[in-house]
Amino acid sequence: MCTEQKITERGDFAPLSPRLAWQLAAIHTWPASIMPVLVAVACAANVTGRLSPLLTLVLLLICILMQASVNTFNDYFDYVKGADSADDNVEASDAVLVYNQVNPRSALALAIGFLIAAFCAGLYVIWCAGFTPLVIAAVGAVIVVAYSGGKTPLSYLPVGEAVSGIVMGGLIPLACYQVLTGRLDFIALVWAVPTIIGVGLIMMTNNTCDIEKDIEAGRRTLPVLLGRSRARAVYRGLMVTWVAAIVAVVTIWFPRGAIVLPFMLLAAYPLMAALWKNPLAPPTRIGAMGQIGSVNVALGAFYAAALFV
């Protein structure tokens, strides 16, 4: 009998308060959606010479709502499948359904509500830019559900890092660039390679720290297949590739922005050095997630600044 059924029988639910809903939305993960939007906005402003503040704010809102939906769906499905527990080295705010007896169905309704709100905000974008962003968003929404739901969720397979990176780090900049420029140009995906890597590393951080937990839950994530030692080696290689990709894109396509790169390296070095030393083990999971979030913000902000220049 699943966890949801057991709790439903007891009926001892706590209400889904605004505070708990905020925790399910997991604000600390929002850089995974905000930074790709900022990069797309910077690319579009550089290419077109103009910037729409209203469209930018709406795009940010949509992507944040989508991220909140992903987080809530993931918490819901992990909880009802018994994959989350109080012994997983997570903060109470990161495991709302574990530490608070909230009706899982309320969390599911919240996740769906986030998606509906994102679609409603997207109506304005469709009115401005046509149906192309809707098609891209629909692809992303299907993947959002497939990532956590179904008999074999994508999060249980060794493709989670690639899927999250491509959807959040690639499709978001592609769609936003199309909206802001009026044309679908796949060069935007090349310019989004740094954000694809950055978002993918957020997932890989979590999965590498959770290797033991995921083995027990029957997950076959990439770090589970690699083992922690090789997973850390791949992880560090991707960190170097991440910085190299930013330098390459700026140097080749946006050379005036190269003036920002030394400042980016100086600002990001201490953050990346700390993350490099992290063993990515269960006891250091909370710190590692904070570190990869900080590195995403630092590199993403400087990358966007270089593109603006």
Image (cartoon, rainbow, N blue to C red):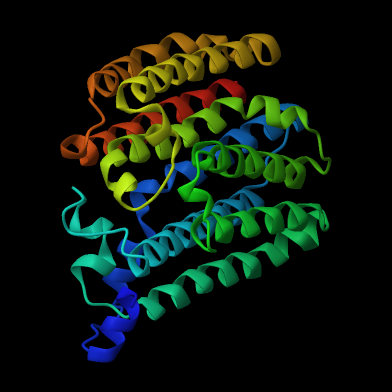
Left or right relative to 102: residue 30: right
Q: State the residue at coordinates (21%, 50%).
A: 90
Q: Quadrant of residue 128?
A: bottom right
Q: Is residue 43 visible?
A: yes
Residue 277: x %, y % from top left: 23, 19
Q: State the residue at coordinates (58%, 33%).
A: 39
Residue 102 vs 122, above or below: the answer is below
Residue 194: x %, y % from top left: 55, 25
Depth check: 200 or 257 in front?
200
Q: State the residue at coordinates (64%, 53%).
A: 140
Q: Quadrant of the C terminus?
A: top right
Depth check: 294 or 306 in front?
294
Left or right relative to 104: residue 168: right
Residue 264: x %, y % from top left: 42, 17
Q: Quadrant of residue 209?
A: top left
Q: Quadrant of the N terminus?
A: bottom left
Left or right relative to 37: residue 71: left
Q: State the residue at coordinates (44%, 8%).
A: 262
Q: Is residue 11 visible?
A: no
Residue 220: x %, y % from top left: 44, 42
Tally the numbered discs.
0
Depth check: 107 or 54 in front?
107
Residue 40 vs 306, above or below: the answer is below
Residue 145 vs 209, above or below: the answer is below
